[in-house]
Amino acid sequence: MIKKIKKRFNWKRILLFLSVIGPGLITSSVDNDAGGIATYSVAGAHFGYSMLWSLIPITIILVIVQEMSARMGVVTRKGLADLIRENLGIKLTLFIMIGLIIANFATTVSEFAGIASSGEIFGLSKYILVPIVAGVVWLLILKSNYKILEKFFLVLILFYFTYVIAGFWAKPDWGVVAKETFLPTINFTPAYLIVLIAMIGTTITPWMQFYLQSSIVEKGVKIKEYAYSKIEVIIGCLSTDMVSFFIIIACATTLFPLGIKIANAGDAALALKPIAGNLASGVFATGFFGAALFGAFILPLATAFYICEAFGWESGVNKNFKQAKQFYTIIASMIMLSALIILIPNVPLVWIMVSSQVINGVILPFTLIAMLFLINNEKLMGKYVNSKFYNILVWATAVIVVILTILMVITTFFPDLFSMIF
């Protein structure tokens, strides 16, 4: 009996799994950044539980795309930008890089906007909080190595559990929640479709694929460890969308019945005060701050990784400033400029966030198609190329993303035309 228990609990395998934890969980979790939380808060406040069903296909797509990135990182030992430059040419690399730089910078600005917004809920001035946070982010990246930063990022993930608490705190009707999750009633109004597109766009973004693959390489995950890394990627995708699930529930239960409309997660936290009390509002705002702080770390890091890979420059937090000057200069520039923009009075933050989503949406199909060509290249991947069934799934995903991208552009720039179609 004892031998059977020992076989079930293979401690060597458990330790091996723990050794690869990091890239998958971190990349998926930070996907729920300031913009993501804002989108899910709006979905719950404006449409109640009716958008919960969409998290099931969104999660499946996220798992498929993230698994491909992780597998390429483990097998090739190169980042995605490296592989695109070496195998698909400079022009495509340059196009994707320019788009990602613009989109990531705009998203980093929105992260600092989230930090400022959540701080003001607690009575902290953005003119004090934002410069302090920017300095701390820069110093931690500059002075830490990958292992230290990874542990710090894993701690930041704990902030997301505040939304699980907020979801239960709201005391939803779980029968209705289950019905809307598994037996959806889809609304075809323009506003509903716009938010649905935004949910997909904020969950599956191009930078995630580049960051995950680079961090897999940086961590040094080996092929023999890939099965455990794959499990971690799946757990990361499931956990991040579980958080999204509870964000929608919290806002759908409290704000939707009263017809309270919001524009972002900061509005949601403030709106919860008279309904659920200061404590519930504080819990929601705390999660928002943690998510925005997480994004303020990851977006500049991700950007620096793939720009350096694309141009063949040294990169990685395990190197010092002298060894990777371009890498650290890019990070410092993004952090400082983003923080400075937030300190400008009346800066158009909504326009910045919408622009970043549109650019991400335009770049994502190119990124997915490039990944498909790379992962099916036997010279690169050997026996680890996609199966036919997997290719069908990914191509279907790419087609869906292209259609959604076109719809997103139409809804952003031609809303009247979109209203006429639907």
Image (spheres, rainbow, N blue to C red):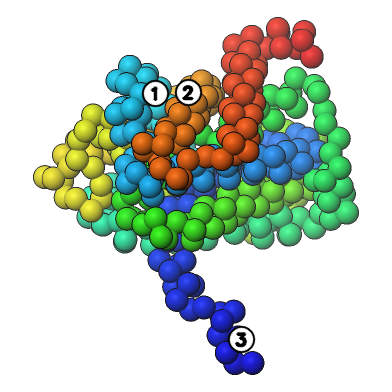
- Is residue 282 or residue 392 the one in the foreground? 392
Give x and y (percent) for residue 14: 49, 72
Q: Check disc 3 and report the residue beneath it.
A: 4
Residue in the picture at 59% in, 36% down: 388
Position of 116 relative to 372 (above/below): below
Task: Give the label on residue 366, or none.
Answer: 2
**Label 3 amino acid?**
Lys
Kindly check if marks 3 and 1 are in contact, taking CB atoms under 8 A apart as contact. no
Circles 2, 3 touching at the beta carbon (< 8 Å): no
Eyeballing the image, is 237 above or below 261?
A: below
Q: Which residue is drawn at the image coordinates 51% and 20% (left, top)?
A: 362
Mark 2 or 1, closer to the camera: 2
Identify the amino acid type marked 1.
Ile
* Residue 327 image point, x, y percent: 23, 39
Report the front residue among 166 and 67. Answer: 67
Q: Quadrant of the C terminus?
A: top right
Front label number (2 vs 3): 3
Q: Is residue 134 left or right of residue 277?
A: left
- Secondary structure under tag 3 reads helix
Q: Which residue is mark 1?
A: 96
- Could you tell me the amino acid type at mark 2? Phe
Q: Residue shown at 51%/34% (left/top)?
A: 205
For the view shown, which residue lies furthest in the left direction?
322
